[in-house]
Amino acid sequence: MNLKVISVVLCFVLSGCTFSVPQAESALRWAKSLKKDKDNSSDEQPIWLASFDERGAVLRPYTTGELVVFANSDGDAVSFDGWIVRSITGFGLSKPVSISGREGVRSVVSGEVAFTTTCGTWVWRPPVWRQRCDQGSSDILLDDEGNIQTISMSLGKKIGFVTLRVAN
């Protein structure tokens, strides 16, 4: 892992975000498959396309503890715990976005902008897991084999919407 990715991971850890272990069987299988892919050459490593606040980035996934961090060498990064995007950095942001909570009350903080939102439980409607919150919804789209293909999450009107989708 290069120095920039380590810096991004440290930024997430030092920002005080709370993280939790993914509970969906498909998320665990997906995270384990990423670890297996680490042994392959970097040309075979999956590429993900991310968009946030009308900016796009090409990211690669890295497993670290209970998270998958999608990152690139430009400093763009999104951390994901298997259910929720937990933090976003880069993408032209002056301060990282930090998200805590899963169901019930969720907190979102980015610089001067901070708010809480109420979120319901995750609902499975094949092939999508969906969670509705006061500030918008989150979706996790799976393929026929149960692998995550798209992750999307609303972060409220003031912060925006984040989407990650597998490109290859």
Image (cartoon, rainbow, N blue to C red):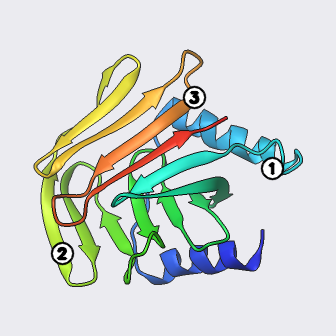
The disc label shown at residue 114, or none: 2
| C-alpha gap between disc 1 and disc 3 | 17 Å
Q: Secondary structure beneath disc 2? A: strand
Closer to the chain start, of discs 1 and 2, is 1
Which of the two residues, 24 or 125, is positioned nearer the viewer here?
125
Question: Of the residues shown, which amino acid type is indicated by label 2?
Answer: Ala
Which of the two residues, 148 or 158, is positioned nearer the viewer here?
158
Closer to the chain start, of discs 1 and 3, is 1
x and y, in percent, of residue 59 in the image:
61, 55
Q: Relative to 151, does residue 3 appear above or below in the rendering?
A: below
Q: Is residue 139 visible?
A: yes
Which of the two residues, 51 or 5, is positioned nearer the viewer here?
51
The disc label shown at residue 38, or none: 1
Question: Of the residues shown, which amino acid type is indicated by label 1?
Answer: Lys
x and y, in percent, of residue 134 in the image:
10, 49
Closer to the chain start, of discs 2 and 3, is 2
From the image, which quarter does the C terminus lie in?
Answer: top right
Question: Of the residues shown, which amino acid type is indicated by label 3?
Answer: Asn
Q: Relative to 85, does residue 22 appear above or below in the rendering?
A: above
The disc label shown at residue 121, or none: none
The disc label shown at residue 147, or none: 3
| C-alpha gap between disc 2 and disc 3 | 33 Å
Residue found 32% across the figure and 23% down from its top:
124
Q: Is residue 21 visible?
A: no
